[in-house]
Amino acid sequence: MRIETATAPGVPGAPNEDFAAVALPAGGHGGALVLLDGVTPPPGNGDCVHSVPWFTSRLGGALLEQSLSRPDGTLADCLSAAIALTAEAHRGTCDLSHPLTPQATVVAVRWGADEVEHLVLSDSALLLEGPDGAVTAVLDDRIDRLRAAGTRVGPLRNLPGGFFTAAADPAVAAKAVTGRVPVASLRAFAALTDGAARGVEVFGSDDWASTFALLRKAGPQALLTRVRDQELADPAGAAVPRGKPFDDATAVLVEL
């Protein structure tokens, strides 16, 4: 088995709000992967005394533990429990009802001897590579559909008809895109925060197949370098308008 990961903050020296972890438990087959992309709030939204990295570390750690310790629960069940545990850790000091309380996108994968289970919530991506090299992207495309319709997405966060992130409400776990595939139908998979997927989703220079080919050949750091080079070529976002000229980027590759 090959497992590689790379991460980089959008701005050197600034806190990286992404979280990534892979665990291979002793005494059995398989493992679990968790990837979170913390949502950066606008300046001046002081509804929580904790930072986004505090939140993603708490939620990511809880989700990884739940994924391993509750093999009979679904990943959605594990995410729901992890959100509840994280909320309890700061409910006494913070206004968790605020729409911009700390939150994150989620990719989770759990695999055993026979099956791979996956979950995607919001705009991070999971890529599945079959034995023939074909790449399938598992995406929660609600934000993209809203933007394509010309809808202002901010007010629709975690509301019916909008899009969903992992914040303080355990019920949003049921909104995630989930699935299961046989282990035999995969030879590898990769999880990407949207900052690592910019070559496909922002710059349009790549597709999911070429992205996976780069990951397999040169590893996650090569993908992050490619994305950063594209950002540096347009540092003000003049040629390719985007919300952040530079973004935190994290990629994890697992070859089974």
Image (cartoon, rainbow, N blue to C red):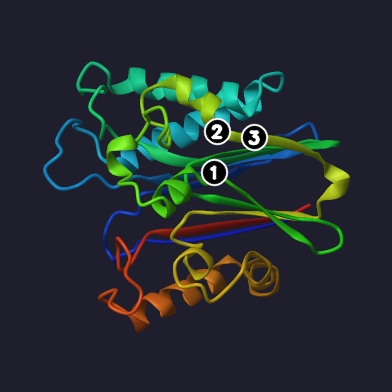
Residue type at mark 2: give it.
Ala
In this figure, which residue is indicated by the disc labeled 3?
Answer: 178
Q: 10 Å neighbourhood of mark 3: few (<14), some, or many (≥20)? A: many
Query: Callout 3: helix, strand or loop?
Result: strand
| Crowding near the residue tagged with mark 2, few <14, some 14–19, many ≥20 C-alpha atoms within 10 Å | many
The reply, left or right, for residue 111 in relation to residue 114 is left
**Label 1 is placed on what type of residue?**
Asp
Dots 1, 3 in contact, CB < 8 A: no
Outermost residue toward the front in this view: 149
Above or below, 201 against 148 in this view is below
Pointer 2: what residue? 176
Name the residue located 81 percent from the left edge and 36 percent from the top edge. 115
Give the CA separation, mark 1 to mark 3.
9 Å
Determine whether label 1 and label 2 are within 8 Å by CB: yes
Q: Are marks 3 and 2 in contact (CB under 8 Å)?
A: yes
Query: Which image quarter holds the N terminus?
Result: bottom right
Where does residue 83 sit, x and y in percent of width and height?
Answer: 44, 25
Q: Disc 1 to disc 2, how far (Cα)? A: 7 Å
- 233 relative to 174, above or below: below
Mark 1 / mark 2, whichever is N-terminal = 1
Residue tagged 1 = 140
